[in-house]
Amino acid sequence: MTPLQTFKPLAGVSVLSFELAFSLPSGTRALHDLGADVVRVSPPERQQDRYISVIDGVFHGKRCIAIDLTKPSGRDLALRLALKADVVCNNFRPHVLEKYGLGAETLRAARPNLITLQLSGYGTPGPWSNFPAFGPSTEAAGGLNRLMVDDNEIPTRLQTGVFADQLAGRNAALAIVAALKHRQDSGEGASLDLSMAACITHLLGVAMTRAALDDGMPPYRFNRDPRFVPQGIYRTLGSDEWLSLSIVDDAAWVRLCRLVADPALSPDADREQRQAKHDAIDVAIERWTSNQDKDDLCRILQQAGIAAAPVRTVADSATDPQFLARKALQSVHHHTPKLGFTAHPHPPLPWRIVGRERRRLTDYRHTGQDNAAVLKSWLQMSDVEIAALRKCGALASQPTLNLKPRPDSPLAEPGFASKLGLPAAGTKQ
Amino acid sequence: MRILEISETPAAAYAALLLTSYGADVDRIELPDRHPHPEVPDQLAADTFLKRNRQLVDPSDVNPADYEVVIEDIGATALQKLGLSWRQLHAAAPSLVLVSLSPFGQSGPYANWAATDINAQAAGGVVHVSGFEEETPRKLPGDLAAMICGIHGATAAFSTTFGISNGAGEGVHIDISAQDTLMHHWTRHVTDYAYSGMTTVRQARDPDGIHTRHTARARDGWIFIHALRQPWQDVAAFLGLGEFISPDLLEPGAPQPWDDTMKAAFTEAVAQRDRYDWFADAAELGWTFAPVEDPWAVANGPQTTARGSMDEVSVDDRTIKVPGVPVRGMNN
């Protein structure tokens, strides 16, 4: 059987990324997945070689060069690389790269068709431009936390930890590919400035618009929706297990009543009537769901044409049948086992390209792992020149990170590997 | 770049909004929303925000050869009825890209599932870690799963047409599932579990201590206190709680147990100043505090105003502000 062609629309595009933490790395990881040659520039000390960087997967596959920008020779090297790239991006605080002679204005004066992108917490210009930010702080400033609660509650944050970072990464990738397309059509480069908080605000655009129309806070509805009644999250069998359910019209309501068969549910009730009795309806539904498995319930409800889905947990996401069928996780193989396993699952580009293969993820590349390879391929440097850069301290590298098991982890439990479909250390694949 | 939008949910509508914001010309086939509820106030808000800056076309006037991309969320059967199935599109325009957006994608056991946004959010994983522990998990506000899917759709449109123009081959059909895209937004938890077996729980509603990620009421609103990895004594001194600095230093970032006296002192101390003052002074120290903004504060705040981040839109006889695209330097 002929292997499918790999989908790489950005083949031939080179990206130099001065990146930290999660946000921009997740965006350039998408560019890598689309075929671009992404080189991340790391500082010489092991800032990003930490447990969390490895498990996040945002550095997977990208080549890494470690340059000391505090040295003139390091800055010269970085400038030479930047002027070779199609795209230069960073998520340092604004003006940091300018200080090193690598700001957008300098680069684009030398190469007008270059595309640069600056990603920061609050963007430029403005009084907050140089304020430090993590994803959770931009969620608060962007309006998300306040919209997660009603007026009587303390605003709460999402516990995903990287929601705003991943959203900013998505927007960074979008802005860059849009700029590449624009340059392809016009020959013009671009100096892009992206705000993490503004990404959150734009995603909440409908709620923001509702607030503007009403001149006040939009009503908080918890898990409900005035269009779909009833709608909610209902407890199912097990500890902290749940099901989502959404009744889209009167016909679906009638079908639900038949399934639940509870006298509290009246099949003749229209949407307004159901809205008025939503609390009692929720209690009746949960009486029905709470002793049943969430996946079994979903099958029953979906067979009846009712919108329902299990609330996936960290433990059962990796074995969700839909994720598995669509290959939402790829096994990334390690040269040497990590934490007792020769591979771990990571999500690839989340698109199915009909008739094509997605680019396979490869393992995390540590600080300076690709110094020589990048300098040879981008600048045609010789071994002698590369050695000189190491000697003067412009280049650095660190050994492979040795991950230590976290305390009290159940990794050693029998069956853990098979539960996730992972080959343990020493297992032949 | 010319794009045809065929939408009945926020997924393709948001993708199209983003595409126009980045300079594409988008024609929209006007279809009724999948679940039309014009009597619900949210509908006007959704239409106002999402359905801007495109021109409407009649399906009978559509010539696929006029477009580089068709982006849709109506499904294969409905596309077929319009005479715009993938097979028909590809025959008419071999380099055309079809981007299909849906809650669960067009393959796999859930492909034909009935779904609204809460279902995609739930199956995508973000819901289980949202809200408070020992309470029902909370969905994200609005149709966020569909809209995140839309961002991917816009990215697919630009990147693929770029590649085709560079000789990467013929047009392709890209099938994007909102559930799949959400996996990325909590991937740290899934992969952490795979590497270490550790699970994630929702936060406690009433934490039993002050810690370096805490929301508190300032004089004029809420402030998110986020002093990651800072020693408690430094945070306490900054907040004016010198009397609670203990010689028994705890690990940076660990919760500091508190009693009613300390809790009252903390509440009073934070309430002494405005949130922007806390924000700015914390920033001087390199700490990532943040004001917890409501929609009015976001729309009219100093940073939004300085960046010109809001668009003005006319609705009936009013002009209101709605969020503009978060990037500057591209057609704006």
Image: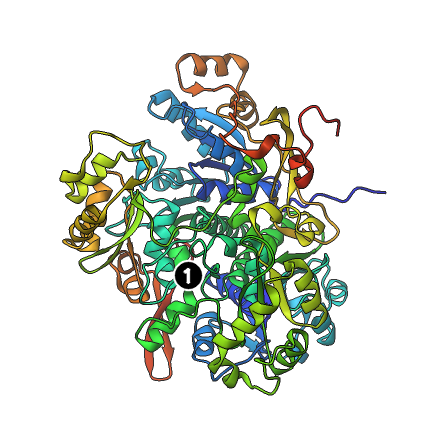
As rendered, which of B193 and B315 lies closer to the eye?
A: B193
x 56%, y 47%: residue: A314
Eyeballing the image, is A207 above or below A401? below
Provide the chain ID for the residue under circle 1: A
x 14%, y 43%: residue: B240
Three-letter code, disc 1 = His
As rendered, which of A261 and A110 lies closer to the eye?
A: A261
As rendered, which of B115 and B133 lies closer to the eye?
A: B133
Eyeballing the image, is B40 above or below B267? below
Label 1 environment density (alpha carbons within 10 Å; few <14, some 14–19, many ≥20): many
Asked which quadrant contains residue B309, the reply is bottom left
Residue B124 visible: yes
> Residue A222 in the image: x percent, y percent?
44, 67
Residue A14 visible: no
> Residue B317 in the image: x percent, y percent?
34, 84
Residue extending farthest to the right is: A1
User: Residue at label 1?
Assistant: A202
> Residue B213 in the image: x percent, y percent?
32, 45
Q: Is residue A198 left or right of residue B232?
A: right
Label 1: element kind: helix
Quadrant of the image containing the N terminus of chain B: bottom right
